[in-house]
Image (cartoon, helix red, strand yellow):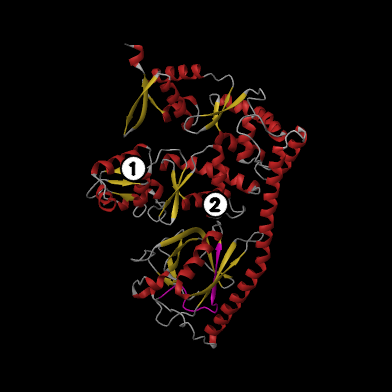
Protein backbone atom coordinates (compact mmCIF):
# COMPACT_ATOMS: atom_id res chain seq x y z
CA UNK A 1 0.00 0.00 0.00
CA UNK A 2 3.03 2.26 0.15
CA UNK A 3 3.28 2.37 -3.66
CA UNK A 4 0.43 4.87 -4.03
CA UNK A 5 1.18 8.59 -4.55
CA UNK A 6 -1.22 11.48 -4.01
CA UNK A 7 -2.45 12.96 -7.24
CA UNK A 8 -4.93 15.53 -8.51
CA UNK A 9 -6.62 12.89 -10.61
CA UNK A 10 -6.28 14.97 -13.77
CA UNK A 11 -4.90 13.12 -16.75
CA UNK A 12 -1.61 14.20 -18.31
CA UNK A 13 -1.17 14.96 -21.98
CA UNK A 14 -0.81 11.64 -23.88
CA UNK A 15 -2.53 9.85 -21.03
CA UNK A 16 -6.02 8.59 -21.91
CA UNK A 17 -8.80 7.10 -19.83
CA UNK A 18 -9.54 3.46 -20.60
CA UNK A 19 -12.29 2.53 -18.15
CA UNK A 20 -13.66 3.57 -14.78
CA UNK A 21 -15.74 1.85 -12.14
CA UNK A 22 -17.55 3.12 -9.05
CA UNK A 23 -17.90 1.34 -5.77
CA UNK A 24 -14.36 -0.02 -5.43
CA UNK A 25 -12.69 -0.73 -2.10
CA UNK A 26 -8.93 -1.11 -1.59
CA UNK A 27 -7.30 -3.72 0.68
CA UNK A 28 -3.67 -3.51 1.78
CA UNK A 29 -2.75 -7.16 1.32
CA UNK A 30 -5.58 -8.88 3.19
CA UNK A 31 -6.36 -5.97 5.50
CA UNK A 32 -9.26 -3.58 5.09
CA UNK A 33 -8.14 0.04 5.23
CA UNK A 34 -10.07 3.29 5.35
CA UNK A 35 -10.35 3.60 1.57
CA UNK A 36 -13.61 1.74 1.27
CA UNK A 37 -15.70 3.50 -1.35
CA UNK A 38 -14.18 5.07 -4.39
CA UNK A 39 -14.10 5.33 -8.12
CA UNK A 40 -11.31 3.37 -9.77
CA UNK A 41 -9.99 4.75 -13.05
CA UNK A 42 -7.68 2.96 -15.44
CA UNK A 43 -5.64 5.10 -17.80
CA UNK A 44 -2.96 4.15 -20.30
CA UNK A 45 -0.36 5.03 -17.64
CA UNK A 46 -1.86 4.68 -14.18
CA UNK A 47 -4.41 3.15 -11.87
CA UNK A 48 -6.18 6.01 -10.06
CA UNK A 49 -8.51 5.76 -7.06
CA UNK A 50 -10.67 8.67 -5.96
CA UNK A 51 -12.76 8.69 -2.78
CA UNK A 52 -16.48 8.95 -3.61
CA UNK A 53 -17.27 11.08 -0.56
CA UNK A 54 -14.19 13.28 -0.63
CA UNK A 55 -13.02 14.04 -4.14
CA UNK A 56 -9.85 15.66 -2.82
CA UNK A 57 -8.63 12.27 -1.65
CA UNK A 58 -7.17 10.89 -4.84
CA UNK A 59 -4.19 8.58 -5.35
CA UNK A 60 -2.54 6.65 -8.10
CA UNK A 61 -0.08 3.91 -8.99
CA UNK A 62 1.83 3.85 -12.28
CA UNK A 63 1.01 0.73 -14.27
CA UNK A 64 4.74 0.07 -14.60
CA UNK A 65 4.74 -0.76 -10.87
CA UNK A 66 2.44 -3.75 -11.44
CA UNK A 67 4.09 -7.15 -11.71
CA UNK A 68 0.94 -9.11 -12.47
CA UNK A 69 -2.77 -9.32 -11.64
CA UNK A 70 -5.16 -12.09 -10.66
CA UNK A 71 -8.91 -12.44 -10.44
CA UNK A 72 -10.61 -13.57 -7.27
CA UNK A 73 -14.16 -14.77 -7.82
CA UNK A 74 -17.07 -13.47 -5.78
CA UNK A 75 -18.35 -15.54 -2.88
CA UNK A 76 -21.35 -15.43 -0.56
CA UNK A 77 -21.36 -11.94 0.90
CA UNK A 78 -18.07 -11.18 -0.82
CA UNK A 79 -17.58 -9.12 -3.95
CA UNK A 80 -15.36 -10.16 -6.83
CA UNK A 81 -11.79 -8.86 -6.47
CA UNK A 82 -8.69 -8.19 -8.52
CA UNK A 83 -5.36 -8.87 -6.76
CA UNK A 84 -2.57 -6.57 -7.93
CA UNK A 85 1.03 -7.62 -7.22
CA UNK A 86 3.49 -4.74 -7.15
CA UNK A 87 7.19 -3.95 -7.48
CA UNK A 88 8.78 -2.34 -4.43
CA UNK A 89 8.38 1.45 -4.28
CA UNK A 90 11.22 3.42 -5.85
CA UNK A 91 13.30 5.56 -3.50
CA UNK A 92 12.33 8.78 -5.27
CA UNK A 93 8.60 8.13 -4.94
CA UNK A 94 6.41 11.13 -4.22
CA UNK A 95 4.38 11.24 -1.00
CA UNK A 96 1.33 9.00 -0.68
CA UNK A 97 -1.15 7.76 1.89
CA UNK A 98 1.20 5.19 3.47
CA UNK A 99 4.91 5.56 4.21
CA UNK A 100 5.52 1.86 4.50
CA UNK A 101 3.69 -1.40 4.15
CA UNK A 102 4.57 -5.00 4.78
CA UNK A 103 2.53 -6.17 1.82
CA UNK A 104 3.66 -6.21 -1.78
CA UNK A 105 0.14 -6.57 -3.13
CA UNK A 106 -3.21 -4.85 -2.90
CA UNK A 107 -6.73 -6.03 -3.59
CA UNK A 108 -9.45 -4.13 -5.39
CA UNK A 109 -12.94 -5.15 -4.32
CA UNK A 110 -15.77 -4.41 -6.77
CA UNK A 111 -18.77 -3.80 -4.55
CA UNK A 112 -20.88 -2.58 -7.47
CA UNK A 113 -19.64 -5.15 -9.99
CA UNK A 114 -17.78 -4.25 -13.18
CA UNK A 115 -14.90 -6.53 -12.28
CA UNK A 116 -15.00 -8.65 -15.45
CA UNK A 117 -14.69 -5.71 -17.79
CA UNK A 118 -12.12 -3.90 -15.62
CA UNK A 119 -9.90 -6.97 -15.41
CA UNK A 120 -10.07 -7.43 -19.16
CA UNK A 121 -9.04 -3.83 -19.83
CA UNK A 122 -6.30 -3.86 -17.19
CA UNK A 123 -4.86 -7.06 -18.68
CA UNK A 124 -4.90 -5.44 -22.10
CA UNK A 125 -3.07 -2.38 -20.85
CA UNK A 126 -0.51 -4.58 -19.08
CA UNK A 127 0.11 -6.43 -22.34
CA UNK A 128 0.20 -3.37 -24.57
CA UNK A 129 2.30 -1.32 -22.12
CA UNK A 130 1.29 1.89 -23.87
CA UNK A 131 2.93 3.98 -21.13
CA UNK A 132 6.33 3.04 -22.50
CA UNK A 133 5.62 4.58 -25.89
CA UNK A 134 3.90 7.74 -24.67
CA UNK A 135 6.12 9.58 -22.19
CA UNK A 136 4.44 11.87 -19.68
CA UNK A 137 5.85 14.08 -16.91
CA UNK A 138 8.67 12.78 -14.70
CA UNK A 139 6.56 12.02 -11.64
CA UNK A 140 4.82 9.22 -13.47
CA UNK A 141 7.94 7.42 -14.63
CA UNK A 142 8.45 5.33 -11.56
CA UNK A 143 10.17 1.95 -11.36
CA UNK A 144 10.17 0.45 -14.85
CA UNK A 145 11.01 -3.00 -13.58
CA UNK A 146 14.11 -5.03 -14.42
CA UNK A 147 15.26 -5.19 -18.05
CA UNK A 148 14.19 -8.31 -19.88
CA UNK A 149 16.75 -11.08 -19.70
CA UNK A 150 18.16 -10.05 -16.32
CA UNK A 151 16.15 -12.12 -13.92
CA UNK A 152 17.38 -11.26 -10.43
CA UNK A 153 16.61 -14.01 -8.01
CA UNK A 154 17.24 -12.04 -4.83
CA UNK A 155 15.00 -10.15 -2.45
CA UNK A 156 11.36 -9.22 -2.97
CA UNK A 157 11.90 -8.61 -6.67
CA UNK A 158 13.22 -12.15 -6.97
CA UNK A 159 10.17 -13.60 -5.24
CA UNK A 160 7.91 -11.62 -7.49
CA UNK A 161 9.76 -12.75 -10.59
CA UNK A 162 9.37 -16.35 -9.47
CA UNK A 163 5.63 -15.81 -8.95
CA UNK A 164 5.48 -14.46 -12.51
CA UNK A 165 7.20 -17.58 -13.86
CA UNK A 166 4.78 -19.78 -11.94
CA UNK A 167 1.83 -17.86 -13.33
CA UNK A 168 3.06 -18.32 -16.91
CA UNK A 169 3.38 -22.03 -16.25
CA UNK A 170 -0.18 -22.23 -14.90
CA UNK A 171 -1.40 -20.28 -17.89
CA UNK A 172 0.17 -22.79 -20.25
CA UNK A 173 -1.42 -25.70 -18.39
CA UNK A 174 -4.82 -24.10 -18.59
CA UNK A 175 -4.60 -23.47 -22.33
CA UNK A 176 -3.66 -27.11 -22.83
CA UNK A 177 -6.62 -28.23 -20.75
CA UNK A 178 -8.93 -26.04 -22.81
CA UNK A 179 -7.85 -27.72 -25.99
CA UNK A 180 -10.27 -30.47 -25.05
CA UNK A 181 -13.06 -27.94 -24.76
CA UNK A 182 -12.38 -26.63 -28.27
CA UNK A 183 -12.64 -30.21 -29.55
CA UNK A 184 -16.00 -30.51 -27.80
CA UNK A 185 -17.16 -27.34 -29.48
CA UNK A 186 -16.22 -28.75 -32.88
CA UNK A 187 -18.33 -31.85 -32.15
CA UNK A 188 -21.24 -29.70 -31.05
CA UNK A 189 -21.06 -27.84 -34.36
CA UNK A 190 -21.15 -31.14 -36.23
CA UNK A 191 -24.21 -32.19 -34.24
CA UNK A 192 -25.99 -28.99 -35.14
CA UNK A 193 -25.19 -29.53 -38.84
CA UNK A 194 -26.55 -33.05 -38.58
CA UNK A 195 -29.85 -31.91 -37.09
CA UNK A 196 -30.17 -29.30 -39.81
CA UNK A 197 -29.65 -31.84 -42.57
CA UNK A 198 -32.21 -34.21 -41.02
CA UNK A 199 -34.71 -31.40 -40.81
CA UNK A 200 -34.15 -30.60 -44.47
CA UNK A 201 -34.57 -34.22 -45.49
CA UNK A 202 -37.85 -34.29 -43.61
CA UNK A 203 -39.00 -31.22 -45.45
CA UNK A 204 -38.22 -32.82 -48.80
CA UNK A 205 -39.92 -36.10 -48.02
CA UNK A 206 -43.01 -34.35 -46.69
CA UNK A 207 -45.32 -36.99 -48.02
CA UNK A 208 -43.71 -39.97 -46.26
CA UNK A 209 -43.80 -38.50 -42.78
CA UNK A 210 -46.97 -37.49 -41.05
CA UNK A 211 -47.64 -33.89 -40.14
CA UNK A 212 -47.66 -34.79 -36.46
CA UNK A 213 -44.23 -36.38 -36.47
CA UNK A 214 -42.77 -33.43 -38.32
CA UNK A 215 -44.19 -31.09 -35.75
CA UNK A 216 -42.76 -33.24 -32.94
CA UNK A 217 -39.32 -33.27 -34.51
CA UNK A 218 -39.38 -29.52 -35.02
CA UNK A 219 -40.27 -28.99 -31.39
CA UNK A 220 -37.31 -31.18 -30.33
CA UNK A 221 -35.06 -28.97 -32.40
CA UNK A 222 -36.55 -25.90 -30.80
CA UNK A 223 -36.11 -27.24 -27.29
CA UNK A 224 -32.40 -27.55 -28.06
CA UNK A 225 -32.49 -23.91 -28.97
CA UNK A 226 -31.92 -24.39 -32.70
CA UNK A 227 -33.93 -21.99 -34.80
CA UNK A 228 -36.31 -23.96 -36.95
CA UNK A 229 -34.89 -23.93 -40.48
CA UNK A 230 -38.05 -25.28 -41.99
CA UNK A 231 -40.48 -22.54 -40.95
CA UNK A 232 -41.71 -20.68 -43.98
CA UNK A 233 -42.31 -16.94 -43.83
CA UNK A 234 -46.08 -17.29 -44.24
CA UNK A 235 -48.31 -17.93 -41.27
CA UNK A 236 -48.65 -21.52 -42.48
CA UNK A 237 -46.30 -23.59 -40.36
CA UNK A 238 -45.70 -23.33 -36.65
CA UNK A 239 -45.30 -25.74 -33.81
CA UNK A 240 -47.66 -26.76 -31.07
CA UNK A 241 -45.51 -24.74 -28.72
CA UNK A 242 -46.01 -21.53 -30.62
CA UNK A 243 -49.71 -22.11 -30.97
CA UNK A 244 -50.08 -22.59 -27.22
CA UNK A 245 -47.91 -19.57 -26.62
CA UNK A 246 -50.05 -17.49 -28.96
CA UNK A 247 -53.19 -18.37 -27.02
CA UNK A 248 -51.43 -17.55 -23.76
CA UNK A 249 -50.30 -14.17 -25.09
CA UNK A 250 -53.81 -13.29 -26.19
CA UNK A 251 -54.94 -13.78 -22.61
CA UNK A 252 -52.08 -11.83 -21.01
CA UNK A 253 -52.09 -8.90 -23.41
CA UNK A 254 -55.79 -8.07 -23.64
CA UNK A 255 -55.89 -5.70 -20.65
CA UNK A 256 -52.52 -3.95 -21.21
CA UNK A 257 -53.46 -3.32 -24.83
CA UNK A 258 -56.70 -1.64 -23.87
CA UNK A 259 -54.82 0.62 -21.45
CA UNK A 260 -52.43 1.71 -24.17
CA UNK A 261 -54.80 2.73 -26.89
CA UNK A 262 -55.11 -0.77 -28.38
CA UNK A 263 -51.56 -1.06 -29.67
CA UNK A 264 -48.12 -2.04 -28.29
CA UNK A 265 -44.72 -2.47 -29.92
CA UNK A 266 -43.16 -5.94 -29.80
CA UNK A 267 -40.40 -4.53 -27.59
CA UNK A 268 -42.99 -3.47 -25.01
CA UNK A 269 -44.68 -6.86 -25.24
CA UNK A 270 -41.33 -8.64 -24.80
CA UNK A 271 -40.57 -6.67 -21.62
CA UNK A 272 -44.07 -7.03 -20.19
CA UNK A 273 -44.29 -10.77 -20.74
CA UNK A 274 -40.79 -11.58 -19.53
CA UNK A 275 -41.14 -9.43 -16.44
CA UNK A 276 -44.37 -11.22 -15.57
CA UNK A 277 -42.82 -14.63 -16.12
CA UNK A 278 -39.75 -14.23 -13.91
CA UNK A 279 -38.39 -17.62 -15.02
CA UNK A 280 -38.49 -19.62 -18.25
CA UNK A 281 -38.28 -16.42 -20.22
CA UNK A 282 -39.30 -16.12 -23.86
CA UNK A 283 -36.67 -15.61 -26.51
CA UNK A 284 -37.33 -12.83 -29.01
CA UNK A 285 -37.66 -15.44 -31.78
CA UNK A 286 -40.28 -17.44 -29.87
CA UNK A 287 -42.29 -14.30 -29.28
CA UNK A 288 -42.21 -13.31 -32.93
CA UNK A 289 -43.15 -16.80 -34.10
CA UNK A 290 -46.03 -17.03 -31.64
CA UNK A 291 -47.31 -13.61 -32.72
CA UNK A 292 -47.22 -14.66 -36.36
CA UNK A 293 -49.85 -17.27 -35.51
CA UNK A 294 -52.27 -14.92 -33.77
CA UNK A 295 -54.33 -14.01 -36.80
CA UNK A 296 -54.47 -17.56 -38.11
CA UNK A 297 -55.74 -18.85 -34.79
CA UNK A 298 -58.50 -16.24 -34.92
CA UNK A 299 -57.40 -14.68 -31.65
CA UNK A 300 -58.51 -11.12 -30.77
CA UNK A 301 -55.00 -9.71 -31.42
CA UNK A 302 -52.81 -9.50 -34.47
CA UNK A 303 -49.23 -8.80 -35.45
CA UNK A 304 -48.58 -5.89 -37.76
CA UNK A 305 -45.42 -4.66 -39.39
CA UNK A 306 -45.12 -0.99 -40.35
CA UNK A 307 -43.21 0.30 -43.36
CA UNK A 308 -40.39 1.38 -41.07
CA UNK A 309 -39.93 -2.21 -39.83
CA UNK A 310 -41.45 -1.53 -36.43
CA UNK A 311 -43.54 -4.53 -35.30
CA UNK A 312 -46.64 -4.13 -33.15
CA UNK A 313 -49.44 -6.13 -31.60
CA UNK A 314 -52.84 -4.56 -31.93
CA UNK A 315 -56.40 -5.46 -31.03
CA UNK A 316 -58.42 -6.84 -33.91
CA UNK A 317 -61.04 -4.25 -33.09
CA UNK A 318 -58.45 -1.63 -34.00
CA UNK A 319 -59.51 -0.18 -37.31
CA UNK A 320 -57.20 2.07 -39.30
CA UNK A 321 -59.90 4.49 -40.36
CA UNK A 322 -61.07 4.98 -36.80
CA UNK A 323 -57.62 5.57 -35.34
CA UNK A 324 -56.70 8.02 -38.07
CA UNK A 325 -59.97 9.91 -37.53
CA UNK A 326 -59.47 10.03 -33.77
CA UNK A 327 -55.89 11.21 -34.28
CA UNK A 328 -57.23 14.06 -36.42
CA UNK A 329 -59.70 14.97 -33.71
CA UNK A 330 -57.03 15.04 -31.00
CA UNK A 331 -54.70 17.15 -33.12
CA UNK A 332 -57.46 19.58 -34.10
CA UNK A 333 -58.44 20.08 -30.47
CA UNK A 334 -54.91 21.18 -29.64
CA UNK A 335 -54.19 23.01 -32.86
CA UNK A 336 -51.02 21.07 -33.54
CA UNK A 337 -49.06 18.27 -31.88
CA UNK A 338 -45.62 16.65 -31.95
CA UNK A 339 -45.25 12.86 -31.51
CA UNK A 340 -44.16 13.36 -27.88
CA UNK A 341 -47.19 15.52 -27.04
CA UNK A 342 -49.57 13.14 -28.77
CA UNK A 343 -48.01 10.17 -26.98
CA UNK A 344 -48.56 11.82 -23.61
CA UNK A 345 -52.19 12.66 -24.35
CA UNK A 346 -53.18 9.23 -25.59
CA UNK A 347 -51.03 7.19 -23.20
CA UNK A 348 -48.94 5.30 -25.75
CA UNK A 349 -45.20 5.13 -26.45
CA UNK A 350 -43.62 7.90 -28.54
CA UNK A 351 -42.61 5.45 -31.24
CA UNK A 352 -46.17 4.26 -31.80
CA UNK A 353 -47.56 7.76 -31.52
CA UNK A 354 -45.28 8.75 -34.39
CA UNK A 355 -46.46 5.80 -36.47
CA UNK A 356 -50.10 6.70 -35.91
CA UNK A 357 -49.55 10.34 -36.88
CA UNK A 358 -47.62 9.27 -39.97
CA UNK A 359 -50.46 6.96 -40.92
CA UNK A 360 -53.01 9.75 -40.51
CA UNK A 361 -50.77 11.91 -42.68
CA UNK A 362 -50.60 9.19 -45.32
CA UNK A 363 -54.38 9.12 -45.40
CA UNK A 364 -54.48 12.85 -45.91
CA UNK A 365 -55.94 13.85 -42.55
CA UNK A 366 -52.83 15.57 -41.22
CA UNK A 367 -49.98 17.53 -42.68
CA UNK A 368 -46.52 18.07 -41.26
CA UNK A 369 -44.32 20.99 -40.28
CA UNK A 370 -40.73 19.75 -40.41
CA UNK A 371 -38.13 22.05 -38.87
CA UNK A 372 -35.02 21.98 -36.69
CA UNK A 373 -37.34 22.25 -33.71
CA UNK A 374 -38.88 18.90 -34.54
CA UNK A 375 -41.74 17.35 -36.44
CA UNK A 376 -45.16 18.83 -35.76
CA UNK A 377 -48.51 17.76 -37.22
CA UNK A 378 -51.45 20.01 -38.13
CA UNK A 379 -54.93 19.17 -39.42
CA UNK A 380 -54.77 19.10 -43.20
CA UNK A 381 -56.68 22.26 -44.06
CA UNK A 382 -55.78 21.94 -47.73
CA UNK A 383 -58.23 19.05 -47.89
CA UNK A 384 -61.02 20.47 -45.80
CA UNK A 385 -60.97 24.11 -46.81
CA UNK A 386 -60.48 24.15 -50.53
CA UNK B 1 -26.77 -21.22 -32.69
CA UNK B 2 -27.54 -23.09 -29.52
CA UNK B 3 -29.96 -21.56 -27.06
CA UNK B 4 -28.91 -18.67 -24.86
CA UNK B 5 -31.36 -18.88 -22.02
CA UNK B 6 -32.83 -16.74 -19.36
CA UNK B 7 -29.63 -14.77 -18.65
CA UNK B 8 -29.69 -13.07 -22.06
CA UNK B 9 -33.46 -12.60 -22.28
CA UNK B 10 -33.51 -10.89 -18.90
CA UNK B 11 -30.53 -8.78 -19.92
CA UNK B 12 -32.51 -7.77 -23.01
CA UNK B 13 -35.32 -6.43 -20.82
CA UNK B 14 -32.81 -4.49 -18.69
CA UNK B 15 -31.14 -2.95 -21.73
CA UNK B 16 -34.48 -1.78 -23.12
CA UNK B 17 -35.35 -0.28 -19.72
CA UNK B 18 -32.11 1.72 -19.51
CA UNK B 19 -32.42 3.04 -23.06
CA UNK B 20 -36.00 4.13 -22.44
CA UNK B 21 -35.13 5.80 -19.14
CA UNK B 22 -32.29 7.88 -20.60
CA UNK B 23 -33.84 8.64 -23.97
CA UNK B 24 -35.15 12.04 -22.91
CA UNK B 25 -31.59 13.12 -22.13
CA UNK B 26 -29.56 11.72 -25.00
CA UNK B 27 -32.17 11.37 -27.74
CA UNK B 28 -31.77 7.58 -27.96
CA UNK B 29 -28.00 7.44 -28.39
CA UNK B 30 -25.85 6.02 -25.57
CA UNK B 31 -22.24 4.86 -25.24
CA UNK B 32 -21.63 1.18 -24.57
CA UNK B 33 -19.80 2.20 -21.37
CA UNK B 34 -22.71 4.13 -19.96
CA UNK B 35 -25.17 1.37 -20.90
CA UNK B 36 -22.88 -1.09 -19.11
CA UNK B 37 -22.69 1.04 -15.94
CA UNK B 38 -26.44 1.68 -15.85
CA UNK B 39 -27.32 -1.96 -16.39
CA UNK B 40 -24.94 -2.98 -13.58
CA UNK B 41 -26.56 -0.41 -11.30
CA UNK B 42 -30.01 -1.69 -12.12
CA UNK B 43 -29.10 -5.31 -11.48
CA UNK B 44 -28.04 -4.65 -7.90
CA UNK B 45 -25.35 -6.07 -5.65
CA UNK B 46 -26.29 -9.71 -5.62
CA UNK B 47 -26.81 -10.31 -9.31
CA UNK B 48 -24.28 -11.89 -11.65
CA UNK B 49 -21.70 -9.60 -13.22
CA UNK B 50 -22.19 -8.64 -16.86
CA UNK B 51 -19.55 -7.83 -19.48
CA UNK B 52 -19.86 -5.51 -22.46
CA UNK B 53 -19.71 -8.52 -24.73
CA UNK B 54 -22.79 -9.94 -22.96
CA UNK B 55 -24.62 -6.71 -23.77
CA UNK B 56 -23.74 -6.85 -27.46
CA UNK B 57 -24.97 -10.43 -27.73
CA UNK B 58 -28.21 -9.64 -25.93
CA UNK B 59 -28.83 -6.76 -28.33
CA UNK B 60 -28.22 -9.00 -31.33
CA UNK B 61 -30.95 -11.28 -30.03
CA UNK B 62 -33.32 -8.37 -29.58
CA UNK B 63 -33.06 -7.44 -33.24
CA UNK B 64 -35.67 -10.13 -33.95
CA UNK B 65 -38.27 -7.86 -32.33
CA UNK B 66 -37.83 -5.29 -35.06
CA UNK B 67 -36.27 -2.82 -32.65
CA UNK B 68 -33.84 -0.28 -33.95
CA UNK B 69 -31.04 -1.38 -31.56
CA UNK B 70 -28.05 -0.57 -33.76
CA UNK B 71 -24.33 -0.24 -32.91
CA UNK B 72 -22.27 2.56 -34.39
CA UNK B 73 -18.49 2.11 -34.01
CA UNK B 74 -16.79 5.28 -32.74
CA UNK B 75 -13.20 5.41 -31.56
CA UNK B 76 -12.55 2.08 -29.86
CA UNK B 77 -16.07 1.60 -28.53
CA UNK B 78 -19.67 1.75 -29.76
CA UNK B 79 -22.57 4.15 -29.66
CA UNK B 80 -25.83 2.26 -29.19
CA UNK B 81 -28.83 3.62 -31.02
CA UNK B 82 -32.01 2.74 -29.16
CA UNK B 83 -34.51 4.72 -31.20
CA UNK B 84 -34.84 4.17 -34.93
CA UNK B 85 -33.59 7.50 -36.17
CA UNK B 86 -32.53 7.64 -39.77
CA UNK B 87 -28.77 8.06 -39.70
CA UNK B 88 -26.92 7.88 -42.98
CA UNK B 89 -23.14 7.67 -43.48
CA UNK B 90 -22.76 11.46 -43.24
CA UNK B 91 -24.38 11.57 -39.82
CA UNK B 92 -22.39 8.62 -38.53
CA UNK B 93 -19.12 10.19 -39.59
CA UNK B 94 -20.04 13.41 -37.76
CA UNK B 95 -20.85 11.36 -34.63
CA UNK B 96 -17.43 9.76 -34.85
CA UNK B 97 -15.79 13.18 -35.01
CA UNK B 98 -17.74 14.30 -31.94
CA UNK B 99 -16.39 11.39 -29.94
CA UNK B 100 -13.01 13.08 -29.46
CA UNK B 101 -14.20 16.07 -27.47
CA UNK B 102 -17.88 15.41 -26.87
CA UNK B 103 -18.72 18.21 -29.28
CA UNK B 104 -17.91 19.38 -32.79
CA UNK B 105 -17.86 22.73 -34.61
CA UNK B 106 -18.46 23.37 -38.28
CA UNK B 107 -14.83 24.32 -38.97
CA UNK B 108 -13.65 20.96 -37.61
CA UNK B 109 -15.95 19.15 -39.99
CA UNK B 110 -14.83 21.20 -42.95
CA UNK B 111 -11.16 20.70 -42.02
CA UNK B 112 -11.09 16.96 -41.34
CA UNK B 113 -13.79 15.73 -43.69
CA UNK B 114 -13.25 18.32 -46.42
CA UNK B 115 -17.00 18.99 -46.75
CA UNK B 116 -18.68 22.18 -47.93
CA UNK B 117 -20.55 24.36 -45.43
CA UNK B 118 -23.93 23.18 -46.76
CA UNK B 119 -23.24 19.50 -46.18
CA UNK B 120 -21.85 20.08 -42.68
CA UNK B 121 -24.83 22.24 -41.69
CA UNK B 122 -27.35 19.72 -42.96
CA UNK B 123 -25.71 16.86 -41.12
CA UNK B 124 -25.62 18.79 -37.84
CA UNK B 125 -29.19 20.01 -38.20
CA UNK B 126 -30.43 16.47 -38.70
CA UNK B 127 -28.73 15.38 -35.46
CA UNK B 128 -30.33 18.38 -33.69
CA UNK B 129 -33.74 17.48 -35.04
CA UNK B 130 -33.49 13.88 -33.89
CA UNK B 131 -32.61 15.12 -30.41
CA UNK B 132 -29.17 13.52 -30.53
CA UNK B 133 -27.19 16.75 -30.43
CA UNK B 134 -27.55 19.97 -28.44
CA UNK B 135 -26.70 23.41 -29.82
CA UNK B 136 -24.52 25.65 -27.67
CA UNK B 137 -24.45 29.26 -28.90
CA UNK B 138 -22.71 30.55 -25.77
CA UNK B 139 -19.43 28.73 -26.36
CA UNK B 140 -16.34 30.81 -27.20
CA UNK B 141 -15.86 31.04 -30.93
CA UNK B 142 -18.18 29.04 -33.16
CA UNK B 143 -21.40 27.33 -32.14
CA UNK B 144 -20.68 23.99 -30.46
CA UNK B 145 -22.82 20.94 -31.21
CA UNK B 146 -22.67 18.65 -28.14
CA UNK B 147 -23.54 14.97 -27.97
CA UNK B 148 -25.25 14.29 -24.61
CA UNK B 149 -24.59 10.59 -25.12
CA UNK B 150 -20.91 11.37 -24.57
CA UNK B 151 -21.30 13.32 -21.30
CA UNK B 152 -19.29 11.10 -18.99
CA UNK B 153 -18.53 11.14 -15.29
CA UNK B 154 -15.29 12.87 -16.11
CA UNK B 155 -17.14 16.02 -17.08
CA UNK B 156 -20.04 15.94 -14.71
CA UNK B 157 -20.24 15.39 -10.98
CA UNK B 158 -23.07 15.46 -8.51
CA UNK B 159 -22.83 18.89 -6.88
CA UNK B 160 -25.10 20.48 -4.30
CA UNK B 161 -26.65 23.93 -4.72
CA UNK B 162 -23.93 25.49 -2.52
CA UNK B 163 -21.12 24.34 -4.76
CA UNK B 164 -23.01 25.40 -7.87
CA UNK B 165 -23.36 28.93 -6.55
CA UNK B 166 -19.70 29.13 -5.59
CA UNK B 167 -18.59 27.85 -8.99
CA UNK B 168 -20.25 30.63 -10.99
CA UNK B 169 -18.01 33.73 -10.92
Image coordinates for residue A227, horizontal then vertical, percent: 65, 43
Q: Residue B40, which numbered label?
A: 2
**As drawn, A184 above or below B2:** below
Q: Which residues are magenta?
A: A95-109
**Neighbourhood count class around disc 2 (C-alpha, 10 Å): few under 14, some 14–19, many 20 upward:** many
Sequence order check: which comes first, mark 2 or mark 1? 2
Q: Please give the name of the residue rendered at 53% of the width and 37% of the height, measured from the top-left corner.
A: B66
Q: Which mark is residue B134?
A: 1
Which residue is rendered at x = 46% and y = 16% of the image?
Answer: A325
Chain assignment, label 1: B
Q: Nearer the viewer, residue A49 or A288?
A: A288
The residue sitting at 51% across, 52% down in the picture is B36
Residue A101 counted in the magenta span: yes
Q: Main secondary structure of the magenta part?
A: loop
Task: Point out the residue furthest to the left here.
Answer: B141
Would you say residue B49 is visible in this rendering?
yes
Residue A343: in sight, yes or no? no
- Which of these two is toward me, A112 or A224? A224
B106 to A181, vertically: above or below:
above
Left or right of residue B126: residue A200: right
Amino acid sequence: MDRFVWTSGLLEINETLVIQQRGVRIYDGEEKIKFDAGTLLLSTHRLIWRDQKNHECCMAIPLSQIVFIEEQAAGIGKSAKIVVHLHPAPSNKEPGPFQSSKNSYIKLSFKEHGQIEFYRRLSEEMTQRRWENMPVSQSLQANRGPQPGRIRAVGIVGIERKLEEKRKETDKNISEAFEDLSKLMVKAKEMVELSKSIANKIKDKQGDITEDETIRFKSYLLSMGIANPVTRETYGSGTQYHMQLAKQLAGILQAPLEERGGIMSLTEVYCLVNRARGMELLSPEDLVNACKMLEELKLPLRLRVFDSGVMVIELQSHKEEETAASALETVSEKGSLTSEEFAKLVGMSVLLAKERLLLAEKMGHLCRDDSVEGLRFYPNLFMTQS
Amino acid sequence: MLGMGDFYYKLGVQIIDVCLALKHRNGGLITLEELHQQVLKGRGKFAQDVSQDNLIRAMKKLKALGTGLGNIPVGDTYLIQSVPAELNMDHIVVLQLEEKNGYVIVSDIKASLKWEMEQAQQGLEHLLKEGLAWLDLQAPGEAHYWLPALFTDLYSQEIIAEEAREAVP
